[in-house]
Amino acid sequence: MPIDTLVGESGSGKSLTALAVLGLLPTGVAQQGGRVLIDGQDVTGLLGAAQRLRGSVLAAIFQDPQAALDPRWNVERFLVDRFVRLRAMEKRTARAAAADILHQVGLHDPARVLRAYPHELSGGMAQRVMIAGALAGNPRILIADEPTTALDVTTQAQILDLIRDIQARTGLGVMMITHDLGVVAEISRRVMVLYGGRLMEQGKTAEVLETPMHPYTSALLAAMPDMDSDNAPVPIPQGGNEQISAFGCPFAPRCTRVLASCHLAMPEPTLLRDGRSYACHTHVEAPKAQAKERLHAHA
Amino acid sequence: MPMLEATGLTRSFLIKRPLRKPVAVSAVGGIDLAIDRSETLAIVGESGCGKSTLGRLLLGLLPVTSGSVRFEGRDLATLPASDWRGQRARMQIVFQNPLEALDPRLPIGHQIAEPLAIHGTASGSSRKAEAERLMREVGLSVSLYDRRPLELSGGQRQRVVIARALATDPAFVVFDEPVSALDVSVQAQIIALIRRLQEANGFASVFISHDLRVVRHVADRIAVMYLGRIVEEGPVKEVLRSPAHPYTRTLIDAVPQIRQRPGRERQRLQGEAVDAMREQKGCAFRPRCPLATIDACALSVPALKSLGHGRSAACHLATGMRTPLQPLV
């Protein structure tokens, strides 16, 4: 399975999507519809109830690893606990497995790391420990919610390499959440662009980034500062205080290509080949052939 | 004469350790730099490299251990206390987290007007008018005057902090990671605002950031820091295009890019910066350096040498020339 990414600004619903899949929605937030399928099996609602399933089928890592680790537990206790609970291991086997899994996440002095408490770990080391904890249950899918956002750029590159490497080695499915299109370009084969809780566009990463079909994707790309170009990042228009219509496209108030119909109804996704789709009235009404041509030119 | 000049700037902190002797850790270890009027210098590096400490030293917010900072020809360390108030109006800082920099209970208009009252630059009635002018200048609607920080978005709060910093019409502003906590679209707005203000107001600035993608668009020159020292300095575009120091190169290679630079193998930086508390000989970057092969790297700390064209680097290999080896001790 390739690495997929979910990209969008804060408030776009990307983390909530992950939490819904994990069955970890906060109190007061309920899933109103839809299903979660893993290998064709419906697991909707199962995950919240069965903790064991979480961890052994789906595992997650988050932005702030220091906050996700219990400050009173050293790394050994954390990892042994994972192995005992998720793999029903004896404590002694679990200890050996803990040392072993640290090697797999690139921590090559396991004796020292196992004794360490979270506050003694650097951000990069703590995220590696979290990844080790996530892998302990031998999950089929890893959900990584902004796993490198709080890290230095050099450490970020190392962690992205590690996730890519683990994915290739184990065939684990990875769903990565990020707000950084640079990270998307580096790591994912497919990308989903979210805005206002809706899917704006999805497809192969290279195609979406090279020939964006949705005005929001284009705006997000233009807003990214580019290290190799003099083109200044272009802010996305603020859109004033007008309410987002409950029926319309959530991006309509900020969209430069907005049509009257955008405020009235959320566009249905337009499907292209290779699982590419976008949800926008402006392209549907503009000559569709032209858009397709652009896509083919790049393929 | 540059507007701001730092020579031999060092700052160390005494770290207390349980059951062991306190140890002096050098956060900034011997930095020389100069900033001209209307010029922006970006300071980049990983967390813990001393870039924020350097920013505070340049403003006199933190006393230096040794070395000096001269602002408009005057040494900040010898400035009499009575002159500091006037001096503060000339130099300002914008922090990363506006919520921590603003008073949560005070309407934002009052916070923008406060420096005007402190420095006596505007009297009661004209103060509000001036605060409103500043709000418009940074792109804030005047209708937000009586709002409190929590009622604003992250981007609006950062505009408030910038407006307040500009209230005294400073000649020098330190921006300490001003866009790091913002969403990309808001980040683009604040970058555009800072660029516009730089041009309109002509202040000199230091832009501290860990994001090389951002600094290209706000700075004229760049200084790359590693463990308390500047390892490379020069015009921002040239340094990003062809870095002279291996650390700069790995930093650039680590930036997640939408469009990859063609035809070049990226170098990955291994490990993390060595513990600043551990003394070590030779170049501080040596343990992680992909190039450190010659003896000089292990024996002597490379000095920041000029490479011509306004560029300099602190690397024994930067010019391909060996520096004379220091005698073994």
Image (cartoon, helix red, strand yellow):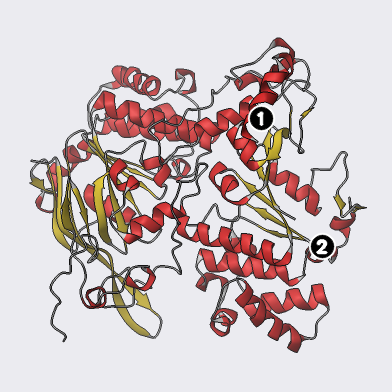
Q: Quadrant for residue B238, please give it.
A: top left
Secondary element type, mark 1: helix
Does A8 sit above or below residue A129? above
- Badge 2: chain ID: A
Residue shown at the point (41%, 41%) measured from the top left: A227
Q: Nearer the viewer, residue B319 or B100?
A: B319
Does B256 sit above or below residue A91? above
| Both marks 1 and 2 on one chain | yes
Q: Nearer the viewer, residue A94 or B27?
A: A94
Give x and y (percent) for residue A194. 68, 36
Q: Give the residue furthest to the top.
A: A260
Please state which amino acid type lies under the numbered disc 1: Leu
Q: Is residue A100 left or right of residue B16?
A: right
Determine which residue is flagged by label 1: A295
Label 1 – label 2 distance at C-alpha: 36 Å
Name the quadrant of the N terminus of chain A.
bottom right
Residue shown at the point (64%, 62%) measured from the top left: A68
Q: Quadrant for residue A225, please give it.
A: top left
Q: Label 1 neighbourhood size at 10 Å, few (<14), some (14-19), many (20+)?
A: some
Task: Name the mark on residue B86.
Answer: none
